[in-house]
Amino acid sequence: MFGTARKKCPATLRVFVRPRLTQRFTQEILGHPKVEVGGKYVGFIRGTKRSERLDERHAAMERLELHVVDYIDDGPRADRTPTFHRGDTEFQIQEFRRLEQRYPEIEHLGSWHSHHPNQLRNLSPGDIEGYRDTVNAEGHNHDFFFASLGTDSRGFASARHFLFVRGDRHYYELTAENLIVTEGPQGSADSAGGALAVPDPGTRGPVPLSVPGWTDSPEGQERLARDRDLIAKYGGLRHVVRSDRIAVTGQVVWAGRVPVTLHVLYPSSAHTNDGLLKVTVAGSQTLEVTLTGDRSGDLAFALKAVESIAQCAADIHHRALHQSAGPPARGGQSGSRP
């Protein structure tokens, strides 16, 4: 692709991969020798997930840890040929939402596919364009996309691995020092000098929320239970815990067509009002609303506010289109020629 160059990853970046995943990767290739196969990587991020500027993303990449614990397979309606691969998107989304309910911090980290039927060792221009589109999408929850390419029947052992970065025309190839195959959770030191444990999707049961001021009070427990019921109605939302504060984050779709990013930071306790509500509607005209005070950490209020904010964004977009259309052109056609 014009303007694209492959570069080497920073030596300090780390991608941890479970042995079970590498075995599944290889067996999938061996079990389907005549068609391309693949899957969607899931796991956890340790480091800065989102930054405003590209230089900040490059700095975050140097300290980034991706913990790839498994992948979601292609699904029953995948389209696979010797030269083409496309997973069953609906199946993969449903599987990811199911994992989110149990593991709120889990992320879609990237994907892998194979070229083993023809043993091509490079990503195709279509692969590169598709990965770039994904990492640049507003709905992608972080600034990175990890991609692997299986090239022959050796599977993971001979695969090549790449990282795409939001807003970057280049992409980056991992070396042996970047990729670590290891069993069990890994983590980087937190501010207290301890280890950040990575939940394992192979374990049973939901991730418990344990935050003083909330889970130790009847009012807080009641509120959390009520909010869990609300979240269950919106597949794109999830509970997370950051620095001993509970938040609900994710994306909802207004009127079946407008994606709205929602972040509700709970107050420090069930009896305070130091929460934060942030709603962003992105498009040709981006609208962002931030609210503090009494209702700011109220998820039910936030979901009601989404409708008004999204409608406002739609009105702004409509007016912008109307103003840019200009006077009717010759022949009765409005606006400029395509």
Image: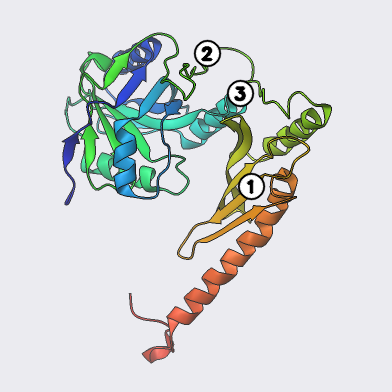
Q: Of helix, strand and loop, which one carries label 3? A: helix
Residue 119, image x, y percentages:
17, 24
Disc 1 to disc 3, C-alpha distance:
25 Å
Camera-side residue of 267 and 107: 267
The crowd level at tag 1 (other Cα within 10 Å; few <14, some 14-19, many 20+) is many
Q: Which mark sits nearer the N-terminus, 1 or 2? A: 2
Query: In percent of the image, x 40 and y 8: which residue is there?
Result: 183
Q: Which mark sits nearer the N-terminus, 3 or 2? A: 3
* Residue 185 vertical position relative to residue 90 in the rendered view, above or below: above
Residue 276 got which mark?
Answer: 1
Amino acid of disc 3: Arg
Q: Of helix, strand and loop, which one carries label 2? A: loop
Disc 1 and disc 2 in contact, CB within 8 angstroms:
no
Residue 317, image x, y percentages:
52, 69
Q: Of helix, strand and loop, which one carries label 1? A: strand
Camera-side residue of 84 and 240: 240
Query: In percent of the image, x 74 and y 32: which residue is there?
Result: 224
Query: In percent of the image, x 30 and y 15: which residue is there?
Result: 180
Query: In percent of the image, x 67 and y 57: which residue is there?
Result: 307
Residue 328, image x, y percentages:
43, 88
The crowd level at tag 2 (other Cα within 10 Å; few <14, some 14-19, many 20+) is few
Instruction: Please give left or right for residue 285 compared with residue 205 in the image.
Output: left
* Residue 71 vertical position relative to residue 296 in the rendered view, above or below: above
Disc 1 to disc 2, C-alpha distance:
34 Å
Q: Nearer the viewer, mark 1 or mark 2?
A: 1
The crowd level at tag 3 (other Cα within 10 Å; few <14, some 14-19, many 20+) is some
Residue 102 got which mark?
Answer: 3
* Residue 296 vertical position relative to residue 106 in the rendered view, above or below: below
Disc 3 and disc 2 in contact, CB within 8 angstroms:
no
Residue 108, image x, y percentages:
45, 32
Residue 288 got which mark?
Answer: none
| Residue bearing mark 2 | 202
